[in-house]
Image (cartoon, grey):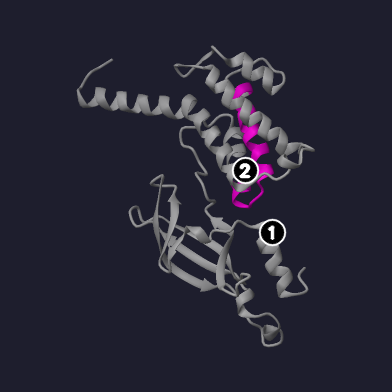
Amino acid sequence: MFKTVDDLVNYVIENYPKVTDSRINDNHWDLQCTTCKVTRGFQVVRREVAAYRSQQYGNLVPESAGPRNYVFRCPVCKSFKNWIVFEIETEDDAGKRRTDIYRVTSLPSEGLEDIAELPPNPPSLRIAYRQAIRAMDANAHLAAAAMFRRALQVITRDILKAKKGTLASELHDVVGKTYNGVTITSNFAANGYIIKEAGNQGAHPDSDPDLLDFTTQDAEDLQNVFMELVSELFIVPAAMKKAKDEFLARRKITP
């Protein structure tokens, strides 16, 4: 519970990502469209204060302490998303005031929450990946690292059928195996090693002070490594098969 508005403000600043730099102007934000899979200027179609002022207590908590609800719409595909944010006014040493915006939550979660090309079985793979994305959205980056590691082990153990052991041994075991027409390369194992080590840091933080803070940038970079890994294994083969099937159908060729 918060005893003062300052307590609330400090809590928001310490626990949620600052998204001020994504704001272009009052009506447009530079956001990722997970439908179009590109970053573009989303339109602000609604902005409102998500607060209720009671007669008895309304004056004790200023309206500025309430969260704002933003509704954004992609100008191309017309998909929309909701953000709950806090707009916090601060003053620098020179006395200049500015408003910073902190995202508390996003509906749906930021980032690509679902990868259509991931195999449906076992379901634990999609669950682990979604948990990683939701953890990133909640600014829980150590938890995200641990869940990316979990998703990786589902791939090595349950999909690639590595000999059960440590994740390190499983990564070594799958190199040279073939899955879905793809031969698992040492690049796959190298990316897997990065995810494994980062996930270990998430589950068991190192005593090294340089590694105790797992930042937003760290989480985003780790997600990119994971995406490179699943792209090699699932996304590229699916795209190639789709292109081939469409060509054969278009040219009326029966394989």
Disc assigned to residue 77: none
- Looking at the rendering, the stretch of residues picked out in magenta corresponds to 134-157
Crowding near the residue tagged with mark 2, few <14, some 14–19, many ≥20 C-alpha atoms within 10 Å: some
Can you identify the residue that label 2 sits on?
131
Q: Quadrant of the C terminus?
A: top left
Mark 1: secondary structure: helix
Residue 156's quadrant in the figure?
top right
Identify which amino acid the numbered label 2 is placed on: Gln
Can you identify the residue that label 1 sits on?
14
Labels in figure, total: 2
Q: Would residue 209 appear left or right of 108 to someone viewing this image?
A: right
Mark 2: secondary structure: helix
Dominant secondary structure of the residues highlighted in magenta in the image: helix
Q: Would residue 1 appear left or right of 185 to someone viewing this image?
A: right
Does the stretch in magenta take in 145? yes
Q: Residue furthest front?
A: 94
Q: Residue furthest top?
A: 176
Residue 178: in sight, yes or no?
yes
Residue at point 65% right, 80% down? 62
Identify which amino acid the numbered label 1 is placed on: Glu
